[in-house]
Every structure is written in C-alpha cells, then in structure tokens.
Image (spheres, rainbow, N blue to C red):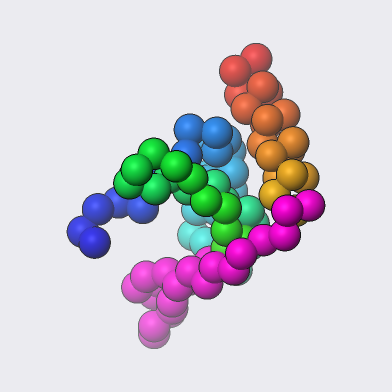
Amino acid sequence: MGQPQSILRHPDMPKAAYKDLWDTAAAEQKWHGYVKNLCKDGSHYWVYATVVPNIRRGETVGYTSVRRKPSRSKIEAAMAQYAQMNQNEEG
C-alpha cells in the first residue's frame, strides 16, 4: 500500500510489456496479459491480469486489475515471448 506498482515488477518482465499495458490503459482501453511479479521474499508468481481504466465523467480516475492464476502452458508461452522481447530490448 502506498508504493508504486512497479516495485512488484520482476526483472524478467520486458519494459515493452508494461509500456503496452500503460499505453492501452491511457487510451481508455482494456488490457490483458501475463505478468511475472516479485514477492517480498524474492520469489515470484505469475498472473493473468486484466486492467481496466475507471472513467468518471470522461476522466480516468484510476484503474482496476483483475488477476487469475494462469495455466502452466500459458506461463511457458509468456516466458518464451518475454525472453525474446528482452533480447530485442538489449539488442
């Protein structure tokens, strides 16, 4: 509480994935995707997240995120995609 959501970001998560999330939300659109987050103890967990902007009187006043546990096959696919994206970012 009171901390930016980015403190949960796992270093394996490509910057482009978060850019897409925030660009989509800023355009007042729903975003969904697989996110790898850090735990306080240094371990990690995966979620399938849906982020929706909360719009009141035409203005975005916040965001709602609904998270579900993804299947192992979806996590493996996301890991492969994110590894490729990270190579492209470094590259």
The residue lying toward the viewer, choosing from 43 and 30, is 43
- Any part of residue 29 in sight: no
Taking the spot 52% from the left edge, 61% from the top edge, the residue there is 25
Taking the spot 39% from the left edge, 48% from the top edge, the residue there is 39
Q: Is residue 19 magenta?
A: no
Q: Main secondary structure of the magenta part?
A: strand
In this figure, what is the number of numbered marks? 0
Q: Is residue 48 above or below residue 91?
A: below
Where residue 50 appears, as percent x and y from the top left, is 58, 67
Where residue 44 appears, as percent x and y from the top left, is 49, 45
Taking the spot 63% from the left edge, 53% from the top edge, the residue there is 34
Q: Is residue 17 above or below residue 26?
A: above
Report the residue that reaches farthest toward the top.
91
Q: Is residue 48 above or below residue 77?
A: below
> Is residue 75 toward the left or the right of residue 89 in the image?
right
Where residue 60 appears, as percent x and y from the top left, is 40, 71
Taking the spot 48% from the left edge, 69% from the top edge, the residue there is 65
Report the residue that reaches farthest toward the left.
2
Where residue 87 appears, as percent x and y from the top left, is 67, 22
- Any part of residue 34 in sight: yes
Q: Quadrant of the C terminus?
A: top right
Q: Is residue 53 magenta?
A: yes
> Is residue 49 toward the left or the right of residue 58 in the image?
right
> Is residue 33 toward the left or the right of residue 57 in the image?
right
Q: Which residues are magenta?
A: 51-73
Q: Quadrant of the N terminus?
A: bottom left
Q: Is residue 44 above or below residue 2?
A: above
